[in-house]
Amino acid sequence: MKKLVISILIVTMVMVFTTIGMGAKKVEISVAEWGDVRWVKDSMALRTYYFEKEHPEVKVNVMPIPMADYYDKLFTMIAGGIAPDTACIAASFLRKFISTGSIISISQFMEKDTTLDWDDYLGHEDVTYDGKVYGLPAGRNYQAWMYNADMFKEAGIPSPYEIQKQGNWTQEKFIEIAGKITKDIDGDGVPDQYGCMFGGWGYREDFFPLVWMAGGKAFDNLQYPTKCLLNSPEAKKALQYAVDLVEKYKITPPPQMEASKLGINFGTGKIAMHMSNIGIACWALFGEWYDFDWNYVLPPRGEKGLYTFAEVVPEVIFTQSKNKEITYEFLKSMTSLPTYFYMLENRGRWIPARKSYTYDPRFEEVYGQFHLDVDWDMMEKYARFLPKPENPLRVNSIIANQVDLAMRGKKTADQACEDMTAKINEVLQED
Amino acid sequence: MSKLSIKKKETLLGYVFLLPWIIGFAVFAGGPIVASAVISLTKWPLIASPKFIGLGNYFKLIQDPLFWQSLKVTAVYMLVIPLHIMVGLFIATLLNSKIKALSFFRVLYYLPCVITGVAVSLLWVWIFNPRFGIFNLLLSKIGIKGPAWLASEIWVLPAFIIMGMWGVGAPMLIYLAGLQNIPTTLYEAATVDGANFWQKFLHITLPGISPILLFNLIMGIIGTFQIFTPAYIMTGGGPNYASLFYVLYVYRNAFQWFKMGYASSLAWVLFLIIMAAVFFMLKYSKRWVYYAGGR
């Protein structure tokens, strides 16, 4: 009898616990983000704060992936049938994911959604293909020159931002002030500090705005490029301008110096201006990266106007996701203004792709104390989106190689432009 | 079982011992090998359906300048093999003698081999830095202005070859084991006969370790063809493809440019090259390799 009672008790307990366990089982969604483990986890803790509060039944699994292997890893996961539910994807990489059916259009959810303030999101063109939206823009980047304000003060030269405000910020002026700062301090015939660094971010990013400002175009179509136009006289002129920074004016370190690696880089205080992006601002500010006064300025105006490039980083939903609707809710929450202001309060390193964010007093309250001279209106006004070839990594590697050869003096700017165009067109035809 | 002859029993037992490896190979390597052969006949962008194109990828690679460039880069880098053999053998010979702190030196020379490839690569990026690197600093002490090693088309491969010497500890350890297997009686007899150091080295040491030389040569060839991490981390194949090693090119095609079919065809060509090299080595090894207990 005693044994029977104990057995019934055990069976009952097992059933009760199993039922409780089943009832408490959470829906799990996985989100892949690029960056180092610590940063991604810290950042996602802030970005998921409201969502997890509002959806206790959902568990968010964060998957940090190093930037260098990010897309390789995502594609391999897709091929293996284990794609995450969502991930951030730079807009210039989006097309490959769309053409292979790896991500879904979120328009189906947006149409039914009455609470989404879509007009407040920046970069609609960057995430819209054939009238369908493929991701909610989360982060945004504008290309801008970051400058070391202390070096300008020491040289007794007005800062680039002051020059820009005076309306005199041109490519010629840029060369002039960079020349004044470039110095060979120890007299060994090699400059120890340079006025600027070209190619510090990437040759494509630094080269395209020069082409636009010379009046040229990189491709025939932004979203579906079929022909590369980088062999135009305007593009050749743009590349020649970049080459002259090294060869003629000697105001930027030559590629052979590997300055961006362990030699001279902006952080060492020996480069007065380097091409960077606004997305870095929060990192540099909250992380106290530099022990000198620094700020941003738009690229100097070229012959045919002023252009910079912009890119948004959308969060997408993968076709393989089994929880698409809740993932959409998750994306909305991650890109909502309350989440962004919660991040801001907690020094979260993020520049959101939301219009109202940068005009909110709370933003000014935090960033204003750093005297960040970013003119967001101008950024928005002069920004162009990057073209989106099917295989951006391959196209980028061709551009990087040919610009590098020109910068080293191994090819003329004209020849490099001709060669990169021919090679890119081959790739475009293959795709 | 009892009716089986001893020889057959031995053979059967041999296969039983081989079985775990055979199963492992069939499941984890054989399947992917066969799959890659099939994939090499397709155009497959990894996340879309493959399209059968026959030998198209193989015809294409003949006309691909980067295929030839990667092959050339890898072939030039093979210079590291004789250097490895000579330096490894030299150090092993030194460490085979009775010197003080022998264990310390053995550990010291082998230690670099246990450090992960990425860390080693980052370390060498610093060592080769043209302005602040220790290599150019040392060269400047003897009045030589060092080049921009990793950023120079001419110097990037010599830089990789120099760096390759970092791993000399692995073959050294095998040589050391080989040297200690040579019976000392042979040296004693040679000494009695009046042989000097070189004569003993040429006629006893070298033949004695010739199977190990062959092993290290084969492993060296295979390893050299498969070099990837340093190039991926340190130069990304640049400048101007001057350090585009073969496997790096395979990787780029497969995982960055999403040309899995083409990458598979490149991998198969690499396999055929390695197989031919090893076959050649084994075939001609009979002329110079001495097996003490060989049949």
Image: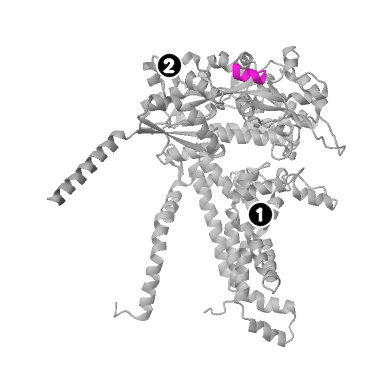
Of the pair B147 and A328, the residue shown nearer to us: A328
Residue A139 in the image: above or below residue A359: below
The circle on residue A116 is: 2
Residue A35 in the image: above or below residue A329: below
Q: Which amino acid, mark 2?
A: Leu
Tell me, what colour scheme is on the image?
A: one colour
Of the pair B289 and A370, the residue shown nearer to us: A370
Of the pair A414 and A95, the residue shown nearer to us: A95
Tell me if label 2 and label 1 are in contact, CB under 8 Å: no
Q: Residue furthest front?
A: A2
The disc numbered 2 marks a residue on which chain?
A: A
The disc numbered 1 marks a residue on which chain?
A: B
Seen at 74% across and 46% down, the residue is: B133
Indicate the quadrant where residue A279 lies: top right
**Dot 2: element:** loop
Residue A145 in the image: above or below residue A409: above
- Depth check, mark 2 against mark 1: the one in front is 2
Seen at 67% across and 63% down, the residue is: B82
Q: Main secondary structure of the magenta part?
A: helix
The circle on residue B77 is: 1
